[in-house]
């Protein structure tokens, strides 16, 4: 039999088999596509790769992400919809039920998914990037200093620090102060000096700010780019923190691993000495903590004062709460944790301010398996974006949601409806520190100063986090006691 005949016979045998295989795969692919199309959330993916990225970032830049991007799509598609952002197919979810489902299923169904630039600048060994047991261990190590009980002993130190700051920086009758900038400097120094025990050197805050500028920019090392400048600043920070960590380790080893000063850095270095944590994990988590504990807190403080200025009746009620506390103290006597607990209305005001002006918009997760939710399938590898505004401005959870009503927090708020600090295993580790910072600063400002906003309707912008566009200037007049 010739070779041609052999080929003909083989072709006659194989061709039907190939046709069956191709037909089977085609039908299966068609069925899968139909099934996926039917089960995927509604929405518009628009163009390949780009998708709706331009619309997303334009709205974010104007701090109108909810109003211009999310809300119109909720009206069109419902609480869950699909889009494409930064090249990734993304499902945007809204509502307390969605927040709870995705935030509590961290490590099981989803995992944290930050842009490459954020990961590189915050640190690959921070708790932001850790999963499972390693995340739980590091969070526990950090959490001992940041829990309400752990911060109790820190209250007198915070009081001294805040009073000294106000007395040295807010002097003068009728002076104009940038409230936002002032509180950024204050909260930054609190994290370093009161929590970590590291002295703030000149230029440190500005270096950290250069890092922040690049966290959401494209991770391209082009000379002069935001990311390039941020990366260079990150290296400066790393060098300074490495020196501080090694000096602390030497000091502790010479004192038989003594960590009785209660500082968070001492606890981390103690773990380093015992081989529970490595040096890079110490540095990366300190960097993350500094950003988490001062930038968002300073914005929350600024918005609290803005709301008080716009609602004088609420301000009078809050002021009376602090006068009652101050009347039971000597002028230079520090607040106690019991005094902090008495500031119930003040915390309602702060929470309502954070509801209307959340310090974070939300965050991305990545599906690590196919997820069945609300009758839809979110395929493995897709991103999930949950938002604070998706519940904070929802009439289902907050009646007259556009109105400022601190008293709404007298009643129980639905779980995962109020999420300025996130939730689940990745809830912000520093939220108790933020709370105490806000309450202590409000106390000393309202009891010692008359103050007035110069631009009550000052626009809020994003760069890359929300901030008052003019720095929220206020005019201060020290009270005569």
Image (cartoon, rainbow, N blue to C red):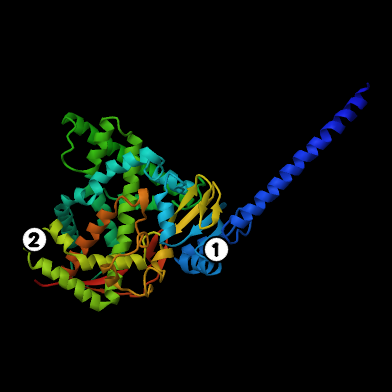
Q: Quadrant of residue 135?
A: top left
Mark carried by residue 55: 1
Return the x and y of residue 454 as percentages of the image width and height: 30, 75
How many neighbours does mark 2 have within 10 angstroms: few (below 14), some (14-19), or many (20 or more)?
Answer: few
Mark carried by residue 332: 2
Return the x and y of residue 326 as percentages of the image width and height: 11, 66
How many neighbours does mark 1 have within 10 angstroms: few (below 14), some (14-19), or many (20 or more)?
Answer: few
Q: Earlier in the sequence, mark 1 or mark 2?
A: 1
Q: Quadrant of residue 41?
A: bottom right
Residue 48 appearing in the image? no
**For numbered disc 2, what is the local secondary structure?**
loop
Residue 154 appearing in the image? yes
- Residue at far top of view: 1
Of the pair 140 and 332, the residue shown nearer to us: 140
- Residue at image location 28% in from the left, 53% down from the top: 188
- Is 217 placed above or below 136 here? below
Cα distance between the residues tagged 1 and 2: 53 Å
**For numbered disc 1, what is the local secondary structure?**
helix
Of the pair 399 and 145, the residue shown nearer to us: 399
Return the x and y of residue 59 as percentages of the image width and height: 50, 65
- Residue at image location 66% in from the left, 51% down from the top: 33
- Residue at image location 63% in from the left, 56% down from the top: 37
Please identify, in this view, whether the residue under mark 1 or under mark 2 is nearer the observer. Answer: 1
- Residue at image location 52% in from the left, 65% down from the top: 78
- Is 320 placed above or below 17 here? below
Return the x and y of residue 434 as percentages of the image width and height: 27, 56
| Quadrant the N terminus occupies | top right
């Amino acid at each position: 039999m010739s070779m041609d005949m052999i080929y003909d016979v083989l072709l006659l045998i194989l061709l039907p088999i190939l046709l069956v295989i191709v037909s089977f795969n085609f039908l299966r692919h068609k069925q899968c596509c139909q099934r996926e199309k039917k089960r995927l959330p509604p929405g518009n993916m628009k163009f390949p790769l780009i998708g709706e990225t331009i619309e997303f970032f334009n709205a974010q830049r104007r701090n109108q992400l909810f109003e211009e991007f999310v809300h119109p799509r909720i009206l069109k598609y419902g609480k869950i919809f699909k889009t494409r952002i930064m090249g990734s197919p993304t499902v945007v979810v809204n509502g307390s039920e969605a927040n709870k489902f995705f935030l509590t299923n961290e490590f099981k169904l989803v995992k944290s998914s930050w842009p490459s630039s954020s990961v590189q600048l915050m640190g690959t060994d921070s708790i932001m990037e850790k999963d499972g047991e390693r995340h739980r261990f590091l969070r526990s190590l950090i959490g001992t200093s940041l829990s309400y009980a752990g911060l109790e002993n820190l209250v007198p130190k915070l009081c001294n620090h805040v009073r000294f700051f106000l007395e040295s920086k807010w002097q003068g009758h009728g002076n104009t102060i940038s409230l936002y900038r002032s509180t950024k400097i204050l909260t930054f120094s609190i994290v370093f000096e009161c929590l970590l025990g590291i002295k703030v050197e000149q230029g440190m805050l500005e270096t950290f700010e250069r890092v922040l500028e690049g966290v959401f920019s494209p991770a391209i090392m082009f000379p002069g780019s935001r990311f390039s400048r941020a990366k260079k600043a990150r290296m400066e920070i790393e060098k300074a923190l490495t020196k501080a960590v090694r000096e602390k380790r030497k000091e502790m080893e010479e004192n038989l691993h003594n960590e009785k000063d209660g500082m968070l850095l001492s606890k981390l270095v103690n773990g380093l000495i015992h081989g529970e944590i490595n040096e890079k994990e110490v540095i990366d988590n300190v960097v993350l903590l500094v950003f988490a504990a001062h930038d968002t807190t300073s914005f929350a403080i600024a918005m609290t004062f803005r709301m008080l200025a716009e609602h004088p009746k609420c301000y009078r009620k809050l002021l009376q709460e602090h006068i009652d506390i101050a009347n039971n103290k000597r002028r230079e006597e520090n607040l106690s944790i019991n005094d902090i607990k008495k500031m119930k209305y003040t915390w309602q005001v702060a929470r309502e301010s954070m509801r209307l002006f959340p310090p974070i918009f939300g965050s991305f997760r990545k599906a690590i398996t196919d997820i069945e939710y609300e009758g839809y399938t979110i395929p493995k590898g897709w991103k999930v974006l949950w938002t604070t505004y998706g519940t904070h401005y929802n009439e289902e959870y907050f009646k007259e949601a556009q109105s400022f009503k601190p008293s709404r927090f007298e009643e129980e708020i639905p779980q995962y409806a109020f999420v300025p600090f996130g939730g689940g295993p990745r809830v912000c580790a520093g939220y108790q520190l933020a709370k105490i910072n806000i309450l202590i600063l409000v106390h000393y400002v309202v009891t010692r100063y008359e103050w007035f906003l110069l631009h009550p309707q000052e626009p809020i912008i994003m760069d890359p986090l929300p901030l008052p566009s003019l720095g929220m200037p206020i005019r201060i007049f020290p009270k005569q006691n």
